[in-house]
Amino acid sequence: MKFLEDAIRDWSTRVWVISEYNIAKKKNNLKYWFIQLSNPYIGKLSFFNFDFTNPALSSSVVKKRQFCCTTSPRDPHPVDFLFHEMIIKQLSTQTFLEMMLKSKASRNQDRFYAILPQSKYKDKVNQVSHWEINTMMSVKLKLFEIMDTQDKWNLFFLSGRSGSSNTFEVPPTFVASDICWDQFGQFVEDQPCNFDTNGINGSSAITLHHNHDLHLYYLQLVPKEYYVLPKDHMDDFDLARMISQHQKMLFNHLKLDKHCLIDFVCLHQYNVKGIPKGMNNRYDELNIVKLIGSFKENKWTLCCIPWADGTKGPKDRYNNDDYGTVFNIY
């Protein structure tokens, strides 16, 4: 059964296959077969049929899903259940970001040609030929440009997670070379966001820009709230060493004044104060991004510092309801 799972997973992550089964999804008419099962002694068997509206064992799969990822090599569920769980995930419940970034493509440009028509961004497909998409870096930068606020916010926090491949030493630090998808289920959408969902004066809470003097892209973020490490606690976390590790990024790439005051900031994906009591510990530990930079020059880069992990670390909370504080993150 594991072999069949791998076959389905390999097939269903190809960008043009994603396009095909999303077309089949509209008519709920998808049939598949494994060539490896063909045998002249078995006789003629019908194709397997995947029902998008009511997949086999779908109710059991939904019950198993929890906030935290529970998949492990010792999963107690039978193999047929795990197979159906996998195929439902691959064919029916993948998000736009998963289809765009987890898929396989011979040309990165094909990700947009194949998947945009199946998404809420289908009106952008006629622009793809002008985008000069060559690398995965260019794919992610373009996504930060064309997606809505919710999707951009999710991609930013996925890239900033400690589980993703990000050294934070090469700009742009908000683009991870490899995202930790195992934890993607922890990015839920039923809790209050840490940005204005109605738009700030008609604009987005997260936008992509280019600094022509530095020749660098940066994201401009406007959170509802943020946390700052108190100055009298900096020695507790050996942050002088952290500043030294990011010296090249801060002073060479971002051209910060070497005498400016360095600050450490923690951004939450969700509005912590709006999350029901008893749940905020899990959100606080899992859905945060940490920044190092300067308020005076408004230049920031992602970093990995221990003080922001959990809810008990020393943090000064700042309310940004007037959206007066903007973070330029390189």
Image (cartoon, grey):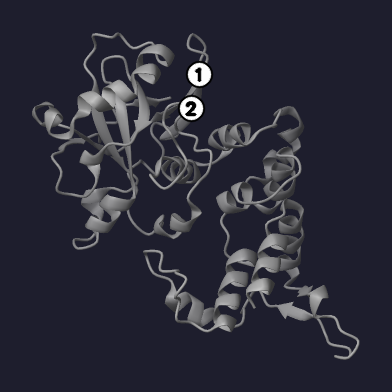
Q: Amino acid at mark 2?
A: Pro
Query: Image point 40% across, 27% down: which residue?
Result: 329
Query: Image point 37% across, 32% down: which residue?
Result: 302
Say if mark 1 contacts mark 2, CB within 8 Å. yes
Q: Is residue 113 above or below residue 60?
A: above
Q: In the picture provided, is 103 more to the left or to the right than 187?
A: right
Q: In the picture provided, is 321 more to the left or to the right than 92?
A: left
Among the 4 quarters of the image, the one containing residue 17: bottom right
Q: Which mark is residue 216?
A: 1
Residue at the outermost right position? 40
Crowd tier of the residue under label 1, counting other residues whose Cα lies within 10 Å: few below 14, some 14–19, many 20 or above: some
Where residue 321 appears, as percent x and y from the top left, is 25, 36
Where residue 107 appears, as percent x and y from the top left, is 75, 40
Q: Which mark is residue 172?
A: 2
- The quadrant of the picture occupied by the N terminus is bottom right
Q: Amino acid at mark 1?
A: Leu
Q: In the picture provided, is 22 more to the left or to the right than 71?
A: right
Q: Is residue 103 above or below residue 209?
A: below
User: Front-most of 18 and 195?
Assistant: 18
